Each structure stands twice: as structure tokens, then as C-alpha cells.
Amino acid sequence: MADFNADILYANRITCGALEMPAVDAPGGYVVATDGVGHLGLVPSSGGPSTAPTSAYAEQSTTYTGNLLIGDHVKFTTAIYTLGMSISIDTTTPYTSAPNVASLGRVGLQGGQRYFLDAALTSVTFVDHVATVTLAWHDANTGAQVGSVVTMGGDGNSNPIVTNGHCRAYYNPGATTRVELRIVANNGLISINHASVRVDTL
């Protein structure tokens, strides 16, 4: 029997279509599950990866000239948004190029899902008009390259230029890990003025 009070419906049992809803709450961390015969219940989470779409986006908007050697990775210092729990962009940990540890600019990925990685150097400074920089996504824990390399050049300019050069990759890590946009070759890049990264589950 239902009772209406201050626009709140109180009921001992609620059925929606063919599904009967749980009558009591459960401890934190429980999830809704069906028994296959029309009853929904609250059960402990298995700890498996979320299947809900998730996305994260961050930027680097302050010019920097250090950490531009081969093996360094692009820094992202400002988190714009994070949706869901599968992706995290590190914008606070001190920078390091050491493997298998947290670092500014690295992206944490939960294992067991497919990801689309998309980073862009939107403004950089080259030493001269023939300078280039080559980048590739890497697994920061294992050191393995993810996807193909991308080379960006000055296009005849030697001052700060807008490149809009993107480095994209698909990745399906078997275990939770971190990835980074790594400098593979530097032939005249002297500063990164603005960069961005967006990562989505597929």
C-alpha cells in the first residue's frame, strides 16, 4: 500500500514493468543486479571495469622549455573535465620520466577496456624553419609504443607557430596502466606553448 506525503511516495513494494525493485538499501559499493526472473537486488561490486562511456580532457597552457629531450613526455597541467572512473589525467604529481610511477602529464587507464587517445601540440616554438619533433603514445609502465609516430615541423617558420598536429592511437591494455605522449626525436623544438589531450573509452 502506498502513502503520499509532501510529494514523496512511500511504498512497501515497487514493480516497474516485469521488474520488482529492492525494498531496502545496501552498504556503499553495492550495485544493482537482476536474478533473471524479474527481481532486482543489491549485490557487492565485482570490481570489474565499468562499461559506461568515460572521457577526460586536459590542457597545457603555460609555455615550458625544459623536459623536451628524447624520452620525455608532454606535460598537461590543467584538467578540464573527467567523466566516469576509467580515465584519469595526472595534472598534479611532480614531473618524472621514470617508468612505472605517477607523473605530471601521464594518463591512467583502467585495464580491460578500449581507448581512443588523442593529443595535440597546438602551439610550439622551433629553433628554425626546418626543425621537427617526433611524438608517439607509449605505455609509461611497460615502455611499449602505442600506435604510430607523428612528426611535426615548422612549415618554414622559426617563431611560435600553431601546428594543430595530432597524435592519435587506439589502446586496449590488459591491466590498469598509464600512458604518455612521448618525444621520440627532437630536432629543434625549443618550447611547448599549448597542448591538449582527450581520451575516451570505446
Image (spheres, helix red, strand yellow):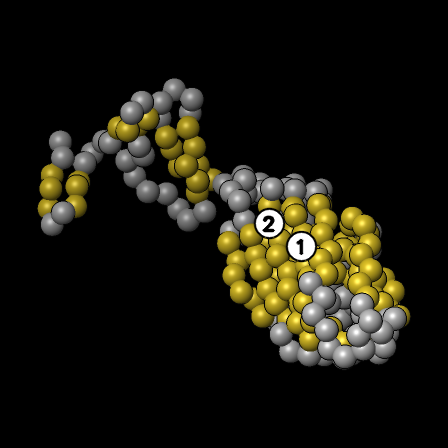
Amino acid bearing label 1: Asp
Q: Quadrant of the N terminus?
A: top left
Q: Quadrant of residue 34?
A: top left
Q: Which residue is drawn at 71% across and 58% down?
A: 166
Alpha carbon of mark 1 to alpha carbon of mark 2: how far? 9 Å
Is 96 placed above or below 17 here? Answer: below
Q: Residue 200 carries which label?
A: 2
Secondary structure state at the residue bearing disc 1: strand
Q: Which mark is residue 174?
A: none
Q: Which residue is drawn at 69% across and 63% down?
A: 164
Q: In x, y percent, where is residue 51? A: 54, 40
Q: Residue at x 24, y 31 (%)?
A: 14
Q: Is residue 81 left or right of residue 14?
A: right
Q: Do the residues labelled 1 and 2 touch (CB within 8 Å)?
A: yes
**Dot 1 or dot 2, earlier in sequence:** 1
Q: Nearer the viewer, residue 119 or 41?
A: 119
Q: In x, y percent, where is residue 138? A: 78, 55
Is the residue marked by circle 1 packed among few (<14), some (14-19), or many (20+) residues within 10 Å? some
